[in-house]
Amino acid sequence: MALSSKKEIKTHWTISSLLGGPDTVGRRIKTEFDLIALSNDGLTKASLDVLIAFLGIPRKQFAEELLGMSVKTIERKKSDDRLDRHTSSHVIEIAKVVEHAITVFEDEEKVRDWLATPNRALNNLCPLELFYMPTGLALVNTILGRIEEGVYS
């Protein structure tokens, strides 16, 4: 029975759902080009809020540490206000890595715990601490791939 619930979680949390689903995102995500178009159009604040809620971290931490912007800038926005292209792209890349973590761990709590726990393979940094830059996201994604393949990480 536990296996079937894991599959439900794994199926439910996709990049699209991590960003609020088609109604919030405004389109269906089928290809990488859909993500590029979404980034160009700009994610809404509502999409950002869904991802932050999934991660279970304070909005201030997400805004200031991961996006390098003031939390007040985000808080002033209405839920349907759009983020700029650069910020949207960064948030999408974070969602992609989180989706990969969900695929690997198949459990939301394990994902949150893993992201917030120092990792020897990441020079004893928490994966979340590396989400502020593309190189860090790529490194976390690589470690997730190693875990997925059964390599000690």
Image: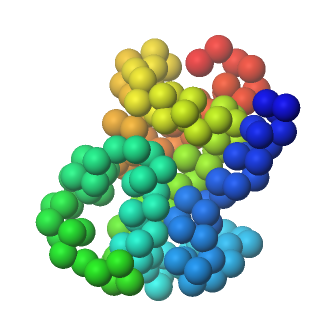
Res. 62 visible in picture: yes
Residue under the image location 36 percent in, 73 percent down: 45
What quarter of the picture does the N terminus occupy?
A: top right
- Residue closest to the eye, 142 or 17: 17
The quadrant holding residue 144 is top right
User: On the rendered structure, is 152 left or right of 137?
Assistant: right
43 w.r.t. 57: above or below: below
User: On the rendered structure, is 8 left or right of 27?
Assistant: right
Residue under the image location 25 percent in, 78 percent down: 77
Res. 89 visible in picture: no
Q: How many marks?
A: 0
The quadrant holding residue 124 is top left
Residue 129 placed where, x, y %?
Answer: 34, 36
Residue 88 placed where, x, y %?
Answer: 42, 70
- Residue closest to the eye, 124 or 57: 57
Residue under the image location 34 percent in, 44 percent down: 57
Residue under the image location 56 percent in, 47 percent down: 97
User: On the rendered structure, is 145 left or right of 19?
Assistant: right
136 w.r.t. 66: above or below: above
